[in-house]
Amino acid sequence: MGLALTLVAALIMAVMALVRPRIAVFTLMALFIFFKELGVGFASSSGSFVFNQYFVNFLNFKFIEFVIPATWLALVLRGGASRPPYLLFERRLMILLLLWVVVLIFVEHFLHGYINVGYFRLLLSGFMLLHCFSMIIKTEEELNAFIKVFLVMIAAAALIGLIKYVLGYGVLGLRGTVPFYFDSKQINAFAFGAVLMLAYVVNYPDLSPGGRILPKVLAYIMFAILAVTVILCFRRTLWVIMIFSSLAVLLMSRRVKVPQFVAIMFSLLIMVIALLAAPQMADTRSRLATYVGSMNLFDAGVVESQENKVHLENVQQYTLMIRENPGIMLFGVFGYPGEDYLRLATVYSGENQARLGTPHNAILKSIVTFGLPGLLIYMAMFVALFYKSRAVGRLPVNKLSRLTAQTSLIFLFFQFSSSLFFVPPFYTHAKGLMYTFLMVLFVRSSLGLDSDSVRRRNADAGGHPGQRLPKSIIGIDKQTGLKL
């Protein structure tokens, strides 16, 4: 029954992509935002039907793995396989990674006689999703509309979680009842949304009329909803990412000076203290104090706590696994010569005799899954993206695309930095792929669409399409040839 419903949904999405491509893509985005990937446990199988392989019950495929390819194929057929030039580098990286995956599959078959593609299906879906998003963003107006829909959806999802939490229907996690817990990549998206809304309201006076996609009062409300949701979810790393990203956004704003910055921070601190002082917040105060104390890694007791101990032991055991097996360094677990290559997480389980969880370290995770070449591709994506920060900074300050790209770069920097030490890399979850690729798209499209507008403007002014005219020349009279 689940497979039949999934096939019908995929067909509907394909037809929608042919008739109303923007609605189809926004529907895909809504599936990621409003449905849980991780639900009542740490396994993806416990999420909603969208991400639950037991709903489809066919070769471990998930609902989303049917819907995305169907939508992508329909969009490609409709748009003639449109390939935005601003994603050229990412496209080359994706092709390189897929070719390396073919090598890994060959190594697995040669050494073990098996072919296991389950590790890589998620990546292929993520690449298709990025292409789907890019195919409906061809102008700056379409990019602004896309940003607006994303922000409204993400704030609505956070509001739904907050309402359920207030009504006593929150998620029971390891730190009590919270609005969201296991779906960590969703909380990560709330943090990004909060930082982007903060950047929007602070820079609102500088934006052009076309860039003011939301009323300022509504933007403040959405920022509050998203920020409060992240705080109440009790996630240490996401707190740090959101706080540091917000500080960077405020410091880089042209409108916020140092005295204003200090005043804003002091006002926010007073508001938080006043909120926590309410009698109804007694339980939240207690849990917050305990959790903030757990962030003090200079305390031996904190370091030896069960939660931190598990993470540290995972890092130690995965490091031991790689050091003892050179083949893993090159080909990941597929380069391990033994028959139990897929059970190495159990073999190296350490003192607890339990299967190792996902390493909270992008370097180890990338090596174990893809080998050293996979790690280099992972690093190259971020390094190339951060290299564009100066180009983003040169975009006109009145553009929403510039603001969104700059905020995305800031958030990605702290997300990338934390993944090297504290959290798994983004590609371990479908939502992590979607939200990270969205931020990559915001950065690349802001530069690509600006370049397209410059080429069109130069061509209209009489210059060569690839030539950037001096700022003093605003046009050329085609009859007289005089510069205007």
Image (tube, helix red, strand yellow):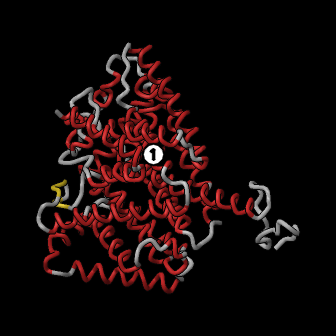
What is the x, y in percent for residue 83?
A: 56, 43
Using residue 11 as the reference point, say whether residue 85 is left or right of it.
Answer: right
Q: Give me the residue at 51% from left, 28% from top.
A: 100
Q: What residue lies at 28% left-to-right and 57% top-to-bottom?
A: 302
The quarter of the image holding the N terminus is top left
Residue 114 visible in the current orientation: yes
Asked if residue 296 can be seen in this view, the reply is no
For this view, does 429 lie left or right of residue 371?
left
Q: Residue furthest left?
A: 168
Image quadrant in which you'd find residue 368? top left
Q: SS at mark 1?
A: helix
Name the residue located 76 percent from the left edge and 61 percent from the top edge: 468
Name the residue type under label 1. Answer: Cys
Closer to the camera in the image, 23 or 432: 23
Q: Position of residue 16 (x, y in %)?
A: 36, 46
Pointer 1 residue: 132
Q: Nearer the viewer, residue 192 or 133?
A: 133
Q: Decide: is 342 above or below 152.
A: above
* Quarter of the rendering occupied by the C terminus: bottom right
